[in-house]
Image (cartoon, rainbow, N blue to C red):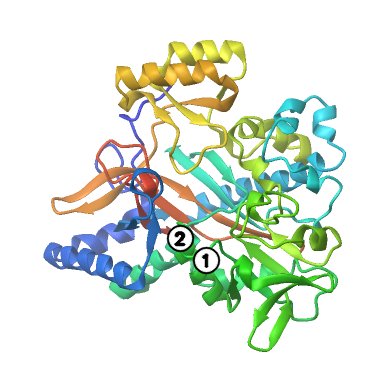
Amino acid sequence: MTQAGSSFDEMFAPDGTVRPAYGGYREWYEAQDQALLRRKGAEAEGFFRSTGITFNVYGDDAGEERLIPFDMVPRIVTAREWRRLSRGIEQRVRALNAFLHDIYHRQEIIRAGRVPLRLIAENDAFLPQMIGLVPPGGIYTHIVGIDLVRTGPDDFMVLEDNARTPSGVSYMLENRETMMAMFPELFSKLSVRPVQDYPRRLAKSLAACAPDCAGSRPVVAVLTPGIYNSAYFEHAFLADQMGAELVEGSDLRVIDGRVAMRTTRGYQPIDVLYRRVDDEYLDPLSFNPASALGVPGIMDVYRAGGITIANAPGTGIADDKAIYSFMPEIVEFYTGEKPLLSNVPTWRCSEPDSLAYVLDNLAELVVKEVHGSGGYGMLIGPTSSKKEISAFAQKLRAKPHNYIAQPTLALSTVPIFTRAGLAPRHVDLRPFVLVSPKGIEITPGGLTRVALKKGSLVVNSSQGGGTKDSWVLED
């Protein structure tokens, strides 16, 4: 087990020399006036505030809007590192799509004994309504976010998969725009691969997934739960950037076997709906009857091939952390290859031996809910009090199947800018992947989330983390 104290620093080697990825950046940084950089940092905060880049907080401070802190020292990856990462990401995304198709059809992986039936049958994210249904183009996960952590020069691991509704791409785009506005000379000095064309490529990828009934120019819309959703800024931002309509459930209705949106010229059929509404609320006739966020009858239209829903309903089962623990077997089963990207070692608390080990070592482990997200409902043993560990042990004994545990990894660090100079902080990375019948596209870089508190391993914005621009260098 590795601890957070002996982390790989992505910019500096242990002897203080600068690693190749950061050579050009370090030269530029050394030539800068520190007072000017401090002013630039304040400028960036003002830019984010004026643009409205905030997120809503759930829980104790529900309804409060917060600015996601931005750090202006980029996270830099070389072209060689990115090529290796991209191969592993593509392999994993192909396996995820094959797995989703299989569990809603022949369930060969269960017949082969590689994944236990109960993990599917007893999982709330598994939707019986999807059994036997093939989405247009055979694509289940149109947009995927794969969370990666780094623990050494060539050691990248997948922390979790986001196959349902991965968020954060708007921050990736705004981080790049902010850096280019503040330091244009830096982009002249270094060849950084662009990310600004993501909305155009997203629109193109979604259009390629349109159903057979679509015309030559498929109509794409973004379905949002509304302004009170934590990611509403992103929904509006992406719709605007794609040239798509931003709609709520109340704007849509089923007319003549199609899902249509209200416009000033009457109702217009939609071909592809990029939905940011959870499965449960998507169709009150098929799921939660109390939902006012979805569209009554949309699942009937979907089953008949009258609309593409991205991502497909039922993909959330691939986000389940118990399923995650089987991803090495899943990748090998569907691709015939060993995984190019490793999983973080994982104990399934539903297994008695694993539960016993986890309970004996809670003070050293990270324990997560299998359906959890956003850093909620988890225990970070090394930073928890004896009282917190004891209380969590009770929850674990009561519902062991609800948890998995992992070692406290020595996440890599990247410097952040502080008033005292550069200081290392732990990071992760969420690359965004677009999937269509025409292929898989991986945006060069992604969203780097950074734990701004010294020594902290929690990077989630909801738990006090911030973001950085992620650079992939050209060859």
Residue 60 lies left or right of residue 283; in this view the side is: left
Q: Residue 196 carries which label?
A: none
In this picture, is 356 found above or below 157?
A: above
- The residue type indicated by label 1 comes to His
Q: In this figure, which residue is indicated by the disc labeled 1? A: 235
Callout 2 amino acid: Tyr
Residue 409, quarter of picture: top left
* Mark whose residue sits in front, 1 or 2: 2
Secondary structure beneath dot 1 equals helix
Quadrant for the N terminus in the image: top left
Residue at screen point 49% across, 61% down: 169
> Among all residues in the image, which is located at the extreme front?
290
Against 62, residue 4 (above or below) is above
The image shows residue 364, relative to residue 420, as above or below, that is above
Residue 361 is situated, as x and y percent measured from the top left of the image, at: 43, 14
Where's residue 420, x and y in %? Answer: 13, 50
Crowding near the residue tagged with mark 1, few <14, some 14–19, many ≥20 C-alpha atoms within 10 Å: many
Return the x and y of residue 316 as percentages of the image width and height: 65, 45
Image position, residue 398 (x, y; %): 53, 17
Residue 74 or residue 435, whichever sits in front: 435
Q: Which residue is drawn at 14% across and 54% down?
A: 419
Q: Residue at (74%, 28%) from the top-left corner? A: 115
Say left or right for 331 vs 473. Answer: right
Q: Is residue 356 left or right of residue 301?
A: left
Q: Give the mark nearer the N terminus: 1 vs 2.
A: 2
Q: How crowded is mark 2: few (under 14 residues within 10 Å), some or many (20 or more)?
A: some
Using the rendered image of the protein, determine whether residue 32 is visible from the camera's viewpoint: no
Asked if the residues shown at circle 1 and circle 2 are in contact, with their CB atoms under 8 angstroms apart, the answer is no
- The residue to which callout 2 is attached is 228
Image quadrant in which you'd find residue 295: bottom right
For label 2, the SS is loop
What is the distance, in whole Å, between disc 1 and disc 2 at their CAs? 12 Å
